[in-house]
């Protein structure tokens, strides 16, 4: 039986762009095929009823339900269990970095995340797809349950409403959209040769966005060649291990790079090789933090370098025009939070009332088979049939009528 949960039992441990570097997000990421085993073990050890894992290129979050207090001791055990290969020093550093949300604050935070109000670039619609995808995976793997389900349903509904009823996502502010618009301004032809370095969420979205708008020539490089192959298949391109970048001899017009490397992936020597003797201006969209392109390259070669910082400047200009839309979005969010309080309480009442029909059936069975068994044995078949019809009618009415009344009383008692 599903355990009824208080609103206070919702918790989120969040690592965002405000607290971690890009490299640290990669350390916390857990591959989809490994999540079921690792999170099932975590649930057992920590006594968690439900859990959902959200992981993007600049966000790692854990949504779960527990009656326990989420303090440093809880976080220590949580991370030691989930990341058993981490040293005690690394665990200790992560314990100090997350944003912790509890109860209705956790609900509000998740809605802000899905609505992109908590994103590095507000209005970036890709996050709602990632939230839905990670929820479906947790549900499929048996990690999340009824209470995360109702929360995610309301969260997705709220995010869609915000995107539909406001202009928060109308003017480009996301990395992907801004980079594409810049390419169009530069009149990059549809048959331009693209090198995509890194096959994470951002580059995957970028590649699919470019394909959607008619670009056709893609070569994908990634440390894990399986990921490169997956993205290349989606784009109709060719995949390569990252180690082969310095040997690539087919030339390029545009580089899109976003890796978690600590040093420059594209060194002057590698760039010279990639040019294959060409001297025309090239476009490099470098979304990595720190940058993947060595600064020396811009000094020696004609390069239009589009960095995260450059895109952020454009985004900030657009965001100023969106200020009033954020106010509208927050109004929708506030209404959604009040609606979710009712939805959550309704679910608790439904769970509490679920035992009533079973109890009524138990009483009926005991009456028929034990208390009044002798009397029933003396009745003729027609009388028994009539009695059973009367009992069935009363059973149905007793369950439906008083159940509705009791549910209404319980719901009204919380208003």
Image (cartoon, rainbow, N blue to C red):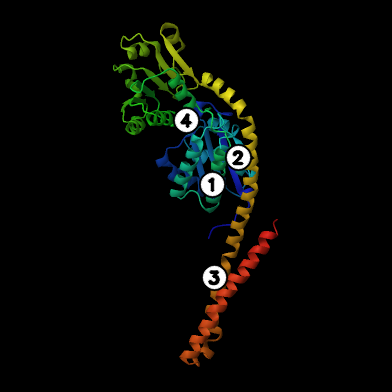
Whether label 3 touches label 4, CB < 8 Å: no
Label 4 vs label 2, nearer the camera = 2
Whether label 4 touches label 1, CB < 8 Å: no
Find numbered disc 1 in the image and state the secondary structure of the residue it sits on: helix
Residue denoted by label 4:
26
Picture coordinates of residue 175 (x, y %)? 49, 26
Picture coordinates of residue 52 (x, y %)? 51, 44
Picture coordinates of residue 321 (x, y %)? 61, 27
Q: Is residue 46 above or below residue 415?
A: above
Task: Tell me where residue 11 sits by quadrant.
Answer: top right
Residue denoted by label 3:
358
Label 3 vs label 2, nearer the camera = 2
Find numbered disc 2 in the image and state the secondary structure of the residue it sits on: helix
CA gap between label 3 and label 4 equals: 49 Å
Residue depicted at 51% across the width and 36% down the height: 127
Q: How many marks?
A: 4
Residue denoted by label 2:
109
Q: Is residue 101 above or below residue 124?
A: below
Which residue occupies the extreme left position in the image?
249
Marks 3 and 1, the one that precedes in the sequence: 1
Mark seen at residue 152: 1
């Amino acid at each position: 039986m599903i355990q009824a949960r208080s609103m206070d039992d919702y918790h989120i441990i969040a690592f965002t762009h405000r607290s971690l570097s890009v490299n640290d997000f990669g350390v916390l990421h857990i591959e989809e095929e490994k999540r079921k085993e690792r999170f099932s073990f975590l649930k057992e050890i920590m006594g968690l009823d439900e859990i959902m894992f959200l992981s993007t290129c600049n966000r790692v979050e854990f949504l779960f339900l527990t009656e326990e207090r989420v303090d440093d001791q809880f976080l220590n055990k949580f991370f030691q269990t989930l990341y058993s290969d981490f040293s005690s020093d690394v665990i200790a550093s992560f314990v100090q970095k997350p944003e912790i949300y509890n109860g209705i604050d956790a609900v509000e935070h998740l809605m802000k995340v899905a609505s992109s109000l908590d994103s590095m670039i507000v209005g970036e619609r890709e996050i709602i797809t990632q939230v839905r995808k990670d929820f479906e995976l947790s549900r499929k793997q048996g990690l999340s349950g009824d209470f995360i389900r109702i929360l995610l349903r309301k969260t997705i509904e709220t995010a869609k409403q915000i995107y539909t009823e406001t202009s928060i996502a109308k003017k480009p502010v996301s990395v992907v959209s801004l980079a594409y618009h810049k390419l169009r301004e530069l009149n990059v032809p549809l048959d331009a040769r693209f090198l995509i370095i890194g096959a994470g969420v951002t580059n995957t979205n970028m590649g699919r966005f470019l394909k959607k708008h008619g670009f056709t020539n893609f070569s994908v490089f990634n440390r894990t060649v399986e990921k490169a192959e997956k993205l290349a298949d989606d784009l109709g391109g060719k995949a390569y291990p990252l180690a082969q970048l310095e040997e690539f001899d087919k030339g390029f017009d545009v580089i899109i790079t976003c890796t978690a490397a600590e040093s420059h992936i594209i060194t002057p020597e590698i760039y010279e090789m990639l040019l294959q003797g060409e001297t025309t201006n090239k476009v490099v969209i470098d979304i990595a933090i720190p940058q993947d392109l060595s600064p020396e390259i811009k000094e020696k070669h004609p390069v239009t370098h589009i960095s995260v910082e450059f895109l952020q400047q454009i985004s900030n200009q657009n965001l100023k025009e969106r200020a009033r839309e954020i106010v509208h979005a927050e109004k929708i969010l506030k209404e959604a939070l009040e609606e979710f309080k009712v939805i959550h309480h309704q679910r608790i009442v439904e769970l509490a009332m679920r035992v009533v029909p079973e109890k009524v059936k138990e009483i009926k069975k005991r009456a028929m088979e034990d208390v009044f068994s002798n009397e029933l044995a003396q009745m003729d078949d027609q009388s028994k049939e009539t009695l059973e019809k009367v009992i069935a009618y009363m059973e149905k009415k007793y369950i439906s009528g008083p159940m509705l009344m009791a549910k209404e009383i319980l719901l009204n008692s919380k208003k």
